[in-house]
Amino acid sequence: MRRTIFQTLIIIAISAAIATASAFLHPRAPAWYLTETPDPWVITPDRIDDLGADILWVDARPAADFEKGHHPGALSLNEDNWGDQVFENQDVLSEAIGNPVIVYCDGSGCERSKHIAERLRQLVGLERVYHLKGDWRELESTGLSR
C-alpha cells in the first residue's frame, strides 16, 4: 500500500516537472498576461492642446444625436450617410489636409469614432486623424471646448 502511494506521488511529481518545463520552454506557449499595444490614433482630452489650434472636429454619432448637441464647429460624418456627408463637406475636408482631425462620439464604449477616423485616413486621405477617448461632453468640463 505504501509503495503504491509512493509510486503515485513520484509519477505526479515527474508529470508536474515536465508540465512546468513545457510551459516555460515551449516555443508557442501562450502569454502569461495580455499586453495591449497603445493605439497611436487615440487622443485624450489632456493631449488635445499639443495638436495646435487648427483642429477639425468630426461628430460620428447619428444625425439625430448631432442635432441635439455637438462640439462647436463640428462636422457630422457618420456611417449611415457617409457618402453624402463626405460629398457635402469635401471643401472643409480638403482644407483639413495637414491639420489634425479629432473624431468623437458618445464615450469609450462607442466604436463609431474609431471607424470614421479609419475611413478618413484610408478613403479621404487625411493623415492626422485621431479618435477621442471618452465622451465629447468631457471637453466642456475641461475647458477644451473651442
Image (cartoon, grey):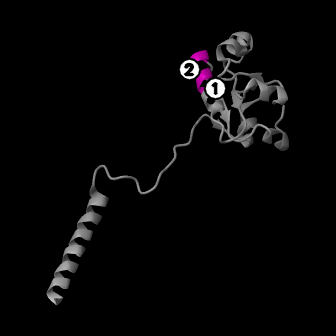
| Marker count (numbered) | 2
Badge 1, how many Cα within 10 Å: few under 14, some, many 20+? many
Quarter holding residue 84: top right
**Relative to residue 117, is residue 123 depicted above or below?**
above
For the stretch drawn in magenta, what is the main secondary structure?
helix
What is the x, y in percent for residue 101?
Answer: 69, 26
Amino acid marked by disc 2: Gln
What is the x, y in percent for residue 70?
Answer: 81, 30
Q: Which residue is mark 2?
A: 122
* Left or right relative to 15: residue 57: right
Which comes before the other along the chain, label 1 or label 2?
1
The residue at 67%/42% (across/down) is: 108
Q: Which residue is mark 1?
A: 116
**Residue found at the far front of this picture:** 1
- From which residue to which does the magenta span run? 118-125
Question: Residue 122 lies in magenta, yes or no?
Answer: yes
Q: Secondary structure under badge 1? A: helix
Foreground residue among 95 and 77: 77
Amino acid marked by disc 1: Ile
**Relative to residue 37, is residue 111 depicted above or below?**
above
* Left or right relative to 140: residue 84: left
* Left or right relative to 105: residue 37: left
In the image, which disc is placed on residue 87? none
Q: Quadrant of the N terminus?
A: bottom left
In this view of the protein, can residue 2 be seen by the observer? yes
What is the x, y in percent for residue 130?
Answer: 65, 31
**Relative to residue 77, is residue 114 depicted above or below?**
below
Q: Nearer the viewer, mark 1 or mark 2?
A: 1
Q: Secondary structure under badge 2? A: helix
Foreground residue among 94 and 81: 81
Question: Residue 102 lies in magenta, yes or no?
Answer: no
